[in-house]
Image (cartoon, helix red, strand yellow):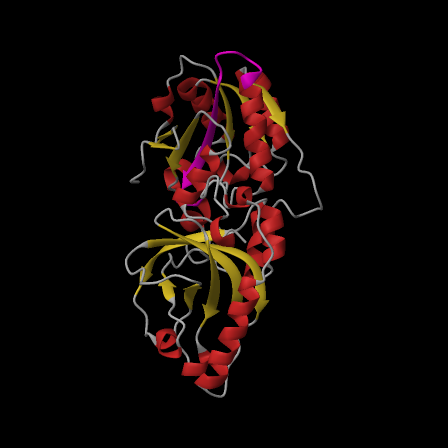
Amino acid sequence: MNLPAQIAGCPVHTDLGALGAHEPTALTLGRFDGVHEGHRALLRATVDAAQATPGTRAVAVTLWPPPEWILRPAQPRALLTTLHDRLVLMAASGVDAIVVLTFDHDFAQQEPREFLSRLRDEAGMRDMVSGPNARIGKGGAGTPPVLRALSRELGFRYREIAWHGPAGTNRSSTIRAALADGDIDAVNRGLGRTYSLEGVVARGAGEGRKLGFATANVSHPEWLCVPGDGVYAGLSVVDGSEPLRTAISIGTRPTYGEHPRVVEAHVLDAAGDFYDRPMRLFFVSRLRGQRTFADTEQLAEAISEDIAAVRAAPLLPAQTLAPFVRDAPAAGGSVR
């Protein structure tokens, strides 16, 4: 894994021993895909547990690659966030350090007791925090009752926190399903922030420019979840620029015949091109589904209507773009 040594001042390690067992830790472990509201409650509880005992560090441990990619390669699960975005979101929770452990078949064979002993001995774990769906160790045998029993045996404190909100809303799978349906309102509620993705702008067919609406094709990993086909009101940030109103189209461009699925962004009131530059797209609301038009004239008319709807989209509080945009200015009414 090629990871940064730190993100937003939070150290990132790839082995437990780098933490040093001489300083006690309050620790939580999980996939943290999406780092949604439930995940953040878990991370906050870990920070609280560390602060309750002076000299204790709050540590979050996550796994890469995702266990299901290794254990069920024929059924690879798409993810809500890249590993980098996951780390940015975890660091924003206030933990003192993050550990990314490599998951492979050998790792998967560790019994819960063996792995918890490692956390205690190598990472100085004195407190462990989990949610109600914890499944740690071989075969997911380390459920909360097992963790509680092993905490007494191995000499650390264990705390299970309960999720709040409607049943099932604090689950990555629920958010993935809402995203596939294009239900951005449900996605943003579940995440507790505005959903976004980042990719590098690649050259496309140039059809949008011919219509008078230049678009940026935003590449992304094939395994990353993206919203269902349709047109969305959103914002874009390029190289740390202020957020700009953006019309985002996802689909196969059926008016031009069948094509590979693409994510295209028309940045309002922006000049020039963004080729080969990183662009982050924030999805505010869904405007309509993908449609096939009789000709390009009808398509251009629909795009004009979409752009008008993007301009009329409600304002967004800047904090909903955090931590990817901090203290975003509302210059020109762009944070909307």
Is residue 173 something that shows in the picture?
yes
In what quadrant of the picture does the C terminus appear? bottom right
Q: Quadrant of residue 9?
A: top left
Q: Residue furthest right?
A: 166
Q: Is residue 93 magenta?
A: no
Q: What span is colored magenta in the figure? A: 51-66
Q: Residue furthest bottom?
A: 294
Q: Position of residue 73 (x, y in %)?
A: 41, 54
Q: Position of residue 75 (x, y in %)?
A: 46, 57
Q: How many marks?
A: 0
Which residue is pictured at 39% across the width and 59% down the height? 222
Q: Quadrant of residue 41?
A: top right
In what quadrant of the picture does the N terminus appear? top left
Q: Quadrant of residue 269?
A: bottom left
Q: Is residue 61 magenta?
A: yes
Which residue is pictured at 35% across the width and 78% down the height? 210
Q: Position of residue 115 (x, y in %)?
A: 46, 28
